[in-house]
Amino acid sequence: MHARASLPRILLVVAALTACDLKRRPTEPGSDPVALIVVRPDSVALDPQQTQSFQAIGVTAAGDTVPATVSWGATGGTITPGGFFTADASNDDGTVIATLSSAQLSGSGKIKKRRLVQIFVTPTNANVQAGNTQQFTAYGRRNTGDSIAVSVSYSATGGTITSNGLYTAGSTAGTYRVIAQEPSASLMDTSAVAVTSAPPPPPPPPADPGAVSNLAVSGVTENAVTLSFTEVTDGAAQPAKYEVRWAAGTISWGSANQVAQGTCSVPVAGSAIGATKSCTVLGLAAGTSYQFQLIAFRGTLNVDAVFGALSNVASGTTSASTAPVATVTLSPATGNLGIGQTLQLVATLKDAAGNTLTGRTVTWSSALPLLASVNSSGLVSGLLAGIVPITATSEGKNGSSSITVAALPPPPTNLYPNEPSGLIVIKEDNWEAGLLGAWFRKFTSADKPITIVPITDSPLGEGQALQIGFNQGHQGGGGTELEYDIPTLQQPREMFVGYYVQVSANWQGHSSGINKMVYLDDGGASFSAMWYEMFGSGSSPLGLYIVNQSGSGPSGMHENIQAVNFTRGVWHKVEIYQKQGSPGVIRVWVDGILATDRSDVFTRDAAIGMVTISGIWGGIGDTKQHFDYMRFDHIRISGR
């Protein structure tokens, strides 16, 4: 009876020992025989070739734990006499067995090998456009439920795939599969790929409209011109529309007039590509030479128009009018000039319908020829102070202008008081003779004319000034300039330049703020110069700015002593002193106020060989929205 009761008791003890982590020990070791061998841990999960230490514990019939000397054996790997197990490389599970050396008792522990049992490909399905790519990845899952990285080989039933899983769809639409295979466990997974056809390429953008090359004047009357040309495409397989412009004399597209009267009024609709189109320009003056030009476009002007190239220029002269003169108008209707100055009057003849007449004889007369005379072309000369009516007569019709002649104040004796003493005058011009003299135009452009014009507001009492004109449509960044080359033996390293300058009352400043006046060139055969400029955009105030393109710096300089303002429509005196050096010196006075005084300006190590009245507007970009001018008077250049 006693022997039968011992087995359940031992099992209960083993369970209790397990719960207590085998911490109970007998008080008298070796007093009872070992009834059971317990192996710890009793179960473990290992990777192939991973190690684990095992322990064998004896349990007596009374439930006490005692040391036990055991021999170790194992399947699925090897174990040392000390119980240190090393799993083999197989995926087979194993067992560790501890056998009591003195009795036929043993205990065991289970070894579960971790092994790859399944692989997965992501994404599980994909839609790929023909020729496009899709990245696939693979991972594995082991029998223990955890996910691991795996090395797989990829293949595809359609298209191509790299060893890294980058799939490229073929050109044929259809359903294909991407296959990932793990070679060591002979596992694989697939992903469905739906290849769709690539959409057709977008149509090419429409071409630019065509260019008319045969614009011609096909007929003229006193006040109208008929134009003809062959219609062109708008670039989108439709007849183009046309913008037609005209100008008296020579046409410049940017400043020419849009046709606003007649069937050539803008926009002119096309009818058929290749057809001959005729239209009429109305409202022209009789007996006048005109030029015409057009451009084809599609879309809407000033909204989304796309233009072709400009056409050729067509020229024509309206017929001389036979209508009698009805009115004579003089311009200006009133005028002022000083004694010794001249003023040009212009007579405009019109018929009863208001059309301008040309080619008629006009005679000029002065009511007081001792005060002011007038020649056969309407040039008035002031002789003595007083108010003089000047009359122009044509076909019995008269027009008059009231001219006030006044004595001029004497010119100032010290025109440029900030000119250093000891400098030798190199050049001084006021253009009163109407000639450029030693100055010459360069980079000539029709939209930036340089002329000598009569003036009546000179602070020096002079009657003419140099004018740089900026036609409507002028683009910033270049155009006509006026250059004076200093004789070699007079080229200085220390220079003074004084001049008077005025911009038009509604002067449009360039968007960059740069409005150039003059530059002093020390580059010889290459370009190297110091620029003196007005600074201000749009209608903003105009200050002073200096740009150093001669030496190492500073590159740009605003006023550092006193801010100045070049008031639009007003004459201003500018005095410049420049001394070459490293560093050199620059001083600038505006209306007698010292604005800039710098002795830290590095220039090229060379004499100054050229003075250029530039008037470059900008910067680049931007467009003149109306006619503007920059005028210069009485320039003085000295140096040593």
Image (cartoon, rainbow, N blue to C red):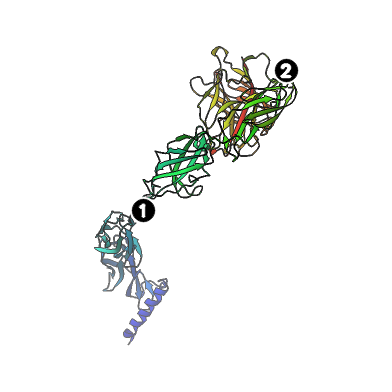
Q: Residue at x 46, y 50 (%)?
A: 299
Residue 130 in percent (x, y) is at 30, 57
Query: Please, which residue is most extreme toward the top here?
Result: 489
Please say whether residue 331 is visible from this viewpoint. Answer: no
Compared across the picture, whether 73 is left or right of 583 comes to left
Q: Nearer the viewer, mark 2 or mark 1?
A: 2
Q: Residue at x 36, y 81 (%)?
A: 9
For numbered disc 1, what is the local secondary structure?
loop
Mark 1 Cα shell of 10 Å, populated few (<14), some (14-19), many (≥20): few
- Residue 413 tag number: 2
Q: Compare residues 237 and 164 and report the one nearer the observer.
A: 237
> Total label count?
2
Under mark 2, the amino acid is Thr
Looking at the image, tell me whether mark 2 or mark 1 is earlier in sequence order: 1
The image quadrant where one finds the N terminus is bottom left
Please say whether residue 518 is visible from this viewpoint. Answer: yes
Can you say whether 241 is above or below 199 in the image?
above
Residue assigned mark 1? 202
Mark 2 and mark 1 in contact? Answer it, CB < 8 Å. no
Residue 68 in percent (x, y) is at 33, 69
Compared across the picture, whether 355 is left or right of 129 comes to right
Q: Compare residues 240 and 128 and report the one nearer the observer.
A: 240
Under mark 1, the amino acid is Pro
Splitting the image into 4 quarters, where does residue 53 fall?
bottom left
